[in-house]
Amino acid sequence: TESKHRRLGGDLKTQSTELGSAVTGSPLTAVLPASTTGKKIVVLSSETQKELAKQAKVTKEERRAQIDERYKYLISRLADGIGLSEQQVEEAIISDDRFQLIEQFFAPSGLKKLLFFYQDVLQEKSNASLRSDGSTNSLLQKKLFITMGSTE
């Protein structure tokens, strides 16, 4: 007789194939399926992490060089409004993936609105370790981020 029970966790063959192709696709990264969260965990080598950090630093310095009086005014208004220092706001803005939205906002026929959210977001600790139940050590942390308001 056929069993009426449904197997949880998906097809084991599919999961191992995903892992195998991810590992063979790049020797520096591995994608591991996380059974309890449904998210995949990417493990980067220390060399890859160093390279990404180096690229992020270069990007931040390029963005910092773009900051003119318009940016400084915006930063000061945000700092006053949310109670952070101007240096903290500047760092958050140049670290944001959507930094280019500010320039589009400043353009003569550019964006008509730009929203800045300062709210709690779930951040993984830098030394996050995978627990036996598949979860990671996480904490709520306030973050300032840029959006056009269409999806957030």
Image (cartoon, rainbow, N blue to C red):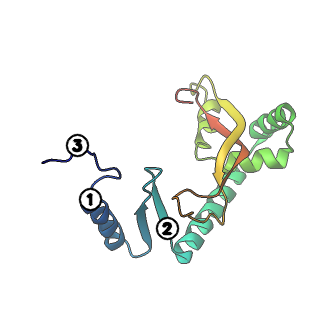
Residue at coordinates 62% horizontally, 58% vertically from top-left? 59
Name the spot of residue 108 as percent of width and height, x first: 61, 26
Residue at coordinates 64% horizontally, 28% vertically from top-left? 114
Q: Which residue is mark 3?
A: 4
Mark 2, Cα crowd under 10 Å, few <14 / some 14-19 / many 20+, is few
- The amino acid type found where label 1 is placed reads Thr
- The amino acid type found where label 3 is placed reads Lys
Q: Nearer the viewer, mark 2 or mark 3?
A: 3
Q: As drawn, is 21 to the left or to the right of 141?
A: left
Q: CA distance from mark 3 to mark 1?
A: 22 Å
Residue at coordinates 55% horizontally, 56% vertically from top-left? 135
Image quadrant of residue 84? top right
2 or 59, which is in the foreground?
2
Which quarter shows the C terminus? top right
- The amino acid type found where label 2 is placed reads Val
Q: Which residue is mark 2?
A: 43
Q: As drawn, is 68 to the left or to the right of 128?
A: right
Q: CA distance from mark 2 to mark 3?
A: 37 Å
Q: CA distance from mark 1 to mark 2?
A: 19 Å
Give the residue furthest to the left. Answer: 1
Q: Which residue is mark 1?
A: 14
